[in-house]
Image (spheres, rainbow, N blue to C red):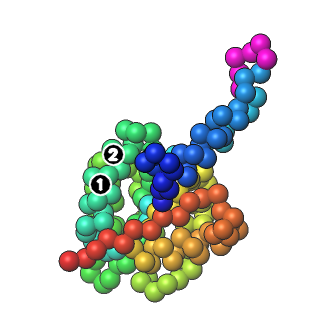
Amino acid sequence: GAARHGKGRTRFPARQRDAEARSSLRPLAGEGTWAARPRVLSRKILHLRSSRSLAGPERHLLELLPGLGRRGFAAEVALLYRRRPGDPAEHPGLARFAAAGIPCFQIDDAGRPGGAARRAVAERLGRGDFAALHGHDPKSDWVIAGALRMAGRRPREAPVRRLATLHLYT
């Protein structure tokens, strides 16, 4: 949150931390390089969604991710597919994400909270330098927490940020 500081100015803690980090950097004497550089995080985000159709959250990602890509963020989508008898072999969103140029992969999910989805996400974490994992439903959030544990990253120690968005269903 924001804090008020004298004369009606508002300071944001994250901005203040960034400014302090920049002010602590000093150019080396006689050289144009910095003595230390702030750590630059990856700009890769893995989005997870558990569904069996192309619904509102998937459409939201299809609209949002191309814009984030133009701003330097790399996104990837993992669709936890809760296929039922009679459903197609591929999640209906795979083709739409591919057509939009968004990397996407499917994880078959039996519908019950199982280890297969957590193992698949943990394996993907081991192959990528993600800055954030973003769940778009409660099951995806649960899979993210389990995948971080399986990958050997405890939630408080993980260098990966976790985000959760509950899309309202009306």
Mark-to-mark CA distance, 1 and 2: 7 Å
Residue that label 1 marks: 62
Callout 1 secondary element: helix
Q: Position of residue 100 (x, y in %)?
A: 30, 48
Q: State if disc 2 and disc 1 touch (CB < 8 Å).
A: yes
Callout 2 secondary element: helix
The amino acid sitting under disc 2 is Pro
Residue that label 2 marks: 66
In-image side of 126 versus 170 (left or right): right
Q: Residue at x 32, y 52 (%)?
A: 64
Q: Residues within 10 Å of mark 2 (few under 14, many from 20)?
A: some
The amino acid sitting under disc 1 is Leu
Q: Main secondary structure of the magenta part?
A: loop
Q: Residue at x 20, y 77 (%)?
A: 170
In-image side of 26 versus 77 (left or right): right
Magenta stretch: give its range.
Answer: 29-34
Q: Residue at x 70, y 32 (%)?
A: 25
Q: Position of residue 116 (x, y in %)?
A: 54, 77
Q: Residue at x 26, y 81 (%)?
A: 86
- Residue 136's place in the image compared with 27, above or below, is below
